Image: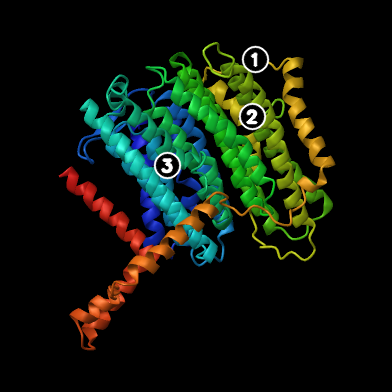
Amino acid sequence: MTGPFWLWISIAWPLFGGLAQWILPACDRRLNLFFRTATLPAVIAVVLCPIDIPTSAPFLMLGMTLHLTEVARLFLLFTSLLWMLAGWYAVPYFVGDKRRHSFGGFYFLSYTGNLGVLIVADIPSFYLFFALMTFAAYGLVLHYRTPAAIYAGRVYVVMAILGEVLIFSALLLMSVNSGSLLIREAVAAVPGSVLDPWVIGFVIFGFGVKVGILPMHVWLPLAHPVAPVPAHAVLSGSMLKAGLMGWILFLPGGQSAYPAWGALMMILGCFGAFYAVILGCTQSNPKTNLAYSSVSQMAVMTIAIGIGLSNAADWTTATWIVGIYALNHAFAKGALFMGIGVVLSEPTSPRFHRYFIVGGLMLAALSIAGSPMTGGALAKRALKYLSEGQHVVMTETLTILLTLSAFATTLLLARLIYLLYQKMIDPNRTPDNQQGLMLPWSIALLAVSGMVWFTILYLHLPVSTAPFTPSDLLKSSLPILAGLVVARLAYQLLRAPKQPVPAGDILLPVAWVSRQLIAAWIRFVANPIEQKDISADSLVRRILPKPSGQRDRVLEADARIRHFEVSGAFLVVLLVIIMLTLAM
C-alpha cells in the first residue's frame, strides 16, 4: 500500500466511524476499539506518504486533491497522535454516559475535518473539511445539554458563522482572481492584485476566530468549561491549530512583505498574551483558567506569524517555528486537560499519589511556560532568534515581551495547579470514579517530555537543536523562577477571588448593548405590528386543521427531525449525497 493510499484511508476511516457511532450504537466493544485505532491511518501516512506529491480524485467534489507538505506532515503528526490519546481517554471517561455515541459521532466527524484541512490542496475541499470540523465540534460543546452548554454553544455557532463568512469570502475572491481552485496557485496570484488587502484581512480575521485572537476569543472560555474533558483536549490542543494552518496556507507571506498587517498581528498577539493571563488568574474554574491560557499561547504563535508576514525572507522559518510551538502546546495542553479529568475522577488520594499527579501537571505546565530543556523552551528560543532579525519591527520590545510572557504564563498555570490541588485534598468532594484515565494521561506526559525533540530529529526539521548554553539556561530559567516566587509570595493570586471576571469577558458588555437594542426595537417597532404565530406546529395545524392521525404523524416527524443526533446524521447524509451527485 502506497503513501497516498493511506492519506485517503486516513480521511475515509474516521468518517465511517462517525456514522457508525450513530447507526450501530449497540456494538460498544467494537466502537471502543475504533476509538483507540481510528487515527492509525494518519500516523502511517506520516511515515509512508511522500512529500509534495499530490494525489487526486477527479470524481469527488470538483476534483479533490490531497497534498502532504513538510509543514503539513508536522501538523498531521501531532494532530493524529493527540486525537488518538483523546480517543483512548474517552473510552473509560464515557462509561455509563447515555450520550456517548452522540459524542463519538461528532468526535470523529470533527477529527475528519481537522485532518482534511491539513492535507487537501484544493479550495472547495479545504472549505468542506474546515466547515465539517467547525460545525461538528458544536456537538462536542453541547454534549451535556446544560443551560451553560447551550449558551456556550450559541456563542460558538455565532462566532463560527462569522469566521466561516470571512473565510468563504477570502477563498472565493482568491479563486476568482487566480482562475484556479488549487490553493498554491490561488495564493500565488494574491500579491499585487486589487483584492490583495481584502483577501489578507479576511484570512487573518476569518481564521483568527478559530485561533482565538482578540477580540474574537470569547467562545473559548465559554466552550471549554462545559464540554467533556476529551473534547477539551482536542479543541484546545488540535482544532485551534487548524486556524494556524489556515494562515500558513492562505497568507502570501513568502512571496511579498506585508509590514502593516504583520505589525497588526504582532500587536494583537502581544496584547492578547497578557490580557488573557490577567483574566485567567481571576478564574476559579480550572477549565476556564486553561481556556485563557490557550488564548495567551495562541497569541504568542500569532506574533510569530506576524513576524513572518512582515518580512518575506522570514516566512518559511516562522512557519516552522509555529509548527514546533504548536506541537509542544498540543501535547502539553492535552495533558493538562486530561489531568483535570484525572483529578476529578480520583477519590481523595494518598499523599504519594497526589504528588505524582501534581508532578505530572507541573511538567506539562512548565513545558508551556518554556522551562529549560523542554519543548517550550526550544520553541521560544527559536522565536526569539527570529524576532532579532534586522527587518522586524519592535525587535527589542518583542524580545522583552516574550520573556515577560514566560513569567505571566507561570503565574497563570501556578494558579491552575493550586486550584486542582485544592480539589484533590477536599474531603467533601464527590469523585467521578472513572477508571482507566491514568494510562492515556501518563502517555500524554511522555509525549510532553520528548515529542518535540524526537520530531525535530526524526523529520529533520530546520530548527536548531544545539545544546543550551549556561547563558540560555539562565535566561529561560529566570522568568519561570520569578513567576514561581511571585506566585508563592502573592498568595492572593492563587486563591479564588471573590468576584472573578465572568468567562467571555468582553462579550458581556456587547450582549448588554444587544439586549438594549432588541428591547428598543420591540418597544418602538415590533409592538405596533401584529405578531403572528409562524411556528412549525401552527403551520401544520393550518394545513391540517382537524385532529387526525396524519397531523399527529407530521408533528411527530417534525419533533424527531429537531432531535440533535437525528439532525446531525441527516446533515452528514445530505453532504454525502451532494458529494456523490457532484461526482456523477
The residue drawn where x is 60% and y is 44% is 292
Left or right of residue 552, residue 413 in this image: right
Quadrant, the C terminus: top left
What percent of the width, then of the height, locates residue 139? 44, 57
Compared to residue 538, the image places residue 346 above or below, namely: above
Compared to residue 34, the image places residue 451 above or below, namely: above
Q: Helix, strand, or loop for circle 2?
A: helix
* Residue 298 visible to the viewer: yes
The residue drawn where x is 69% and y is 46% is 281
What percent of the width, then of the height, locates residue 378? 63, 24
Pick whichever, 540 or 231, lies toward us: 540
Identify the residue under disc 1: 466
Q: CA distance from mark 1 to mark 3?
A: 33 Å
**Which residue type does callout 3 highlight?**
Asn
Identify the residue under disc 2: 376
Identify the residue under disc 3: 114
Q: Helix, strand, or loop for circle 3?
A: helix
Q: CA distance from mark 1 to mark 2?
A: 15 Å
* Residue 88 visible to the viewer: no
The residue drawn where x is 39% and y is 61% is 22
Pick whichever, 226 or 60, lies toward us: 226
* Residue found at the very far top of the displayed protein: 390
Pick whichever, 515 or 168, lies toward us: 515
Q: Helix, strand, or loop for circle 1?
A: loop
* Residue found at the very far bottom of the displayed protein: 547
